[in-house]
Image (spheres, rainbow, N blue to C red):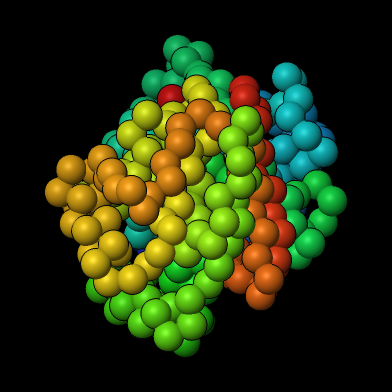
Amino acid sequence: MRALLVVNPQATTTTPAGRDVLAHALASDVKLEIVQTSYRGHAADAASQAAADGFDLVIAHGGDGTVNEVVNGVLRGGPRPDGPMVGVVPGGSANVFAGALGIPRDPVEATHVLLQSIEHGTRRRIGLGQVFADVLDGDGRWFTFNAGMGLDADVVAGVEHKRAKGHHASPALYLSVALKAYAQNLRKPQHFTVEIPDEPPFDDVGMVFVSNTDPWTYFGDKAIRLNPSTSFDGGLGLSALKTLRVPTAGRFVAQVLATGNPKSGKLVRRDDVGYVRVKCEEPANLQVDGDFLGTTTAVEFRAVPDALTVAV
């Protein structure tokens, strides 16, 4: 088996020693090559080349951003039945995709799971989401666990800005940025129109969140759930709040933290939808898998079943 190990040395919990231990463990079972990323998009370029060169497995060692790039590289040009599997050894702060697949968040334990998958040939075919917008090229962008417009994308953009200034990613950083973004939204609310199959449009929505699986993130070790019935085996999940005013948003957050099954007359929640289309008059932030993509006024999120093979 030919395998490419893509390592993001800037990820939160990756270290040279951990990389070397991982490489040594893998080299006993596969013909291994290693790439250390040095620019944004490097992981996607390396994974795309590996797919073109006929590699059997591409392993992402980093955070969810590295995983997203690897997936987009492997699927550059579209899903192929003969394309490489994707393996994940977490090295970030949240590692949502790995957690949703049941892969341990500890890199040593995750390496053991990956080696067992290689030895026994265990794999899983999963569905993904794909987003199309004017800020992207014609092929769009794949996402593995979530995407959104509005408040959550504002938070992602704010955290990226803080990290660029040297701040360490942590639940405390996300919380402080979220509170600031929420206050800004109260001062200047955003207004979205949302379309899903077989229903009339939902107008004047305050926030749009689309998930490809559940949970969609973690607050420390706590799994955060919005669409418990959404999984890699079905369509997309939609959670859209009609207003972000304090009473509605407060009850929503309390329900998410307490039960993970929010319900409200102000909440549009659907599971297993084939697409979600979002429009707005003023440009709004867009994020996928915790990666800020820019601002746009129109987006389409599509469910793509059986898009990727993962080693689990």
* Residue found at x 51% / y 66%: 150
State the residue in front, 63 or 26.
Answer: 63
From the viewer's perspective, is residue 248 above or below residue 174?
Answer: above
In the picture, measured across the screen, residue 156 lies left or right of residue 42, that is: left
State the residue in front, 201 or 100.
Answer: 201
How many numbered marks have been drawn onto this rendered protein structure? 0
x and y percent of residue 259 in the render?
18, 43
From the viewer's perspective, is residue 167 above or below residue 281?
Answer: below
Image quarter in which the N terminus is found: top right
* Residue found at x 73% / y 51%: 132
From the viewer's perspective, is residue 159 above or below residue 251?
Answer: below
x and y percent of residue 50 in the render?
73, 39
Whether residue 78 is visible here, answered yes or no, is yes
Whether residue 30 is visible here, answered yes or no, is no
Residue lying farthest top? 120
x and y percent of residue 91 in the render?
40, 53
* Residue found at x 43% / y 58%: 242
Image quarter in which the C terminus is found: top left
State the residue in front, 303 or 182.
Answer: 182
From the viewer's perspective, is residue 223 above or below residue 93?
Answer: above
x and y percent of residue 37 in the render?
61, 61
* Residue found at x 37% / y 67%: 244
